[in-house]
Image (spheres, grey):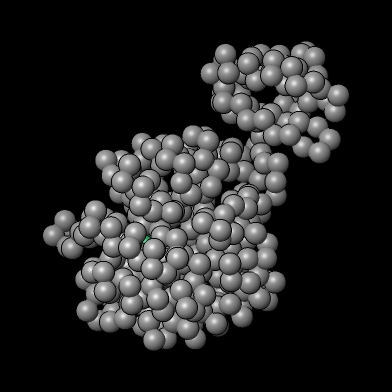
């Protein structure tokens, strides 16, 4: 429910509404606007109705919010679009495009450093690199773990690129808070609600990937888990979903980009690497994502993908990355977006 205050409502009257909601166990989010303040009342709508808030001083009206997701909804936001910075790089702004690139997995200092230099030079705004890998088989390479976080920290210092890495377990959360600039929640953990709450409390920007078989409503409700902990810096990522089509690794749902832009204020990026599983498709899909209005992309790049321990076939050759980046930037420019 949304409680809309009158233009004359005093701070004390707003506070009284918040107290009444919280006493009922309802999450209250105060959104000061230019004319009036609105208060998002997130909890059981029946319970909110029973509070009879319409009768309180300063309250203009109480209106239902129709969507199943609340904090992520563009209905319940005082800004049309969330814009924030990751180490000085703007994410979500109408005029910026965020290029996140790097190896699938951190395998050694040298392998990571070489790619980081190439992508930084070509205009990437952040470096990706897996430390703990969510592998389908427990017998596949699982990542270098904490050693990878140390490598990322070194490479960040050398290149100035903020780093994105995936957190797979709440156990590692404190180390991630120290070492990474953006905490990724992978597709397989999108509905790991305990992990989402932990990530919400870390106070770091979060890159939340859409689950392999999750609807967009479910993605936005997952984002609500992070947002309700007071962490507003959430980036959504479309990374392909399971459909009847098996020609590609997943089906990239490009319609998700404009749909999410309509229904949420959160920045939206696309991962054409994991969606397609094939580097030959990454360029066209990345360009399409940029032209569809995405706020950025995240792509995998390796100097020698054939030797990669994970996801070799989809990683772009580092030598091809500058041309790839220029091409994507040209498509982002169609929508007046420049590389962040
Ligand atoms: C990744 O980005 O490294 C990854 C494993 O992606 P996803 O969770 O989308 O499969
Ligand atoms: Mn990968």
Residue 244 x %, y %: 39, 65
In the picture, measured across the screen, residue 262 lies left or right of residue 305, that is right
When the figure is inspected, residue 331 is found, relative to residue 264, above or below; the finding is below
**In which quarter of the view is residue 138 placed?**
bottom left
| Badge count | 0
**In which quarter of the view is residue 254 placed?**
bottom right
**In which quarter of the view is residue 1 placed?**
top right
Residue 187, can we see it? no
Residue situated in front as seen by the camera: 86 or 64 = 86
Residue 149, can we see it? yes
Residue 166 x %, y %: 35, 54
Q: Residue at x 40, y 76 (%)?
A: 117
Q: Residue at x 48, y 58 (%)?
A: 237
In the picture, measured across the screen, residue 140 lies left or right of residue 218, that is left
Residue 135 x %, y %: 24, 58
Q: Residue at x 69, y 19 (%)?
A: 15
Residue 215 x %, y %: 48, 51
When the figure is inspected, residue 201 is found, relative to residue 157, above or below; the finding is above
When the figure is inspected, residue 120 is found, relative to residue 197, above or below; the finding is below
Q: Residue at x 36, y 40 (%)?
A: 195
């Amino acid at each position: 429910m949304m409680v809309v205050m009158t233009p004359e409502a005093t701070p004390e009257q707003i506070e009284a509404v918040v107290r009444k909601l919280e006493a009922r166990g309802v999450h209250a989010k105060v959104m000061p606007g230019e004319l009036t303040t609105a208060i998002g009342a997130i909890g059981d709508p029946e319970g909110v109705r029973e509070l009879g808030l319409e009768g309180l001083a300063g309250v203009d009206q109480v209106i239902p919010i129709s969507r199943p997701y609340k904090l992520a909804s563009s209905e319940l936001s005082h800004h049309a679009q969330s814009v924030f910075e990751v180490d000085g790089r703007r994410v979500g702004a109408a005029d910026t495009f965020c290029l996140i690139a790097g190896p699938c997995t951190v395998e050694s200092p040298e392998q990571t450093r070489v790619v980081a230099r190439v992508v930084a030079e070509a205009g990437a705004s952040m470096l990706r690199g897996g430390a703990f890998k969510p592998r389908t088989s427990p017998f596949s390479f699982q990542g270098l773990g904490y050693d990878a976080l140390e490598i990322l920290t070194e490479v960040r210092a050398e290149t100035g690129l903020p780093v994105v890495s995936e957190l797979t377990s709440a156990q590692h959360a404190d180390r991630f808070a120290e070492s990474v600039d953006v905490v990724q929640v992978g597709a397989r953990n999108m509905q790991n609600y305990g992990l989402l709450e932990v990530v919400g409390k870390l106070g770091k920007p979060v890159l939340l990937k859409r689950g392999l078989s999750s609807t967009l409503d479910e993605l936005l409700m997952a984002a609500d888990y992070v947002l309700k902990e007071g962490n507003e810096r959430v980036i959504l990522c479309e990374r392909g979903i399971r459909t009847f089509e098996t020609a590609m690794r997943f089906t990239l749902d490009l319609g998700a980009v404009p749909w999410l832009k309509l229904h949420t204020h959160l920045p939206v990026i696309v991962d054409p690497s994991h969606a397609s599983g094939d580097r030959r498709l990454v360029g066209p899909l990345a360009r399409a994502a940029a032209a569809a209005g995405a706020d950025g992309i995240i792509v995998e790049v390796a100097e020698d993908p054939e030797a990669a321990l994970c996801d070799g076939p989809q990683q772009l050759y580092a030598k091809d990355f500058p041309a790839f980046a220029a091409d994507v930037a040209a498509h982002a420019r169609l929508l007046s977006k420049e590389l962040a």
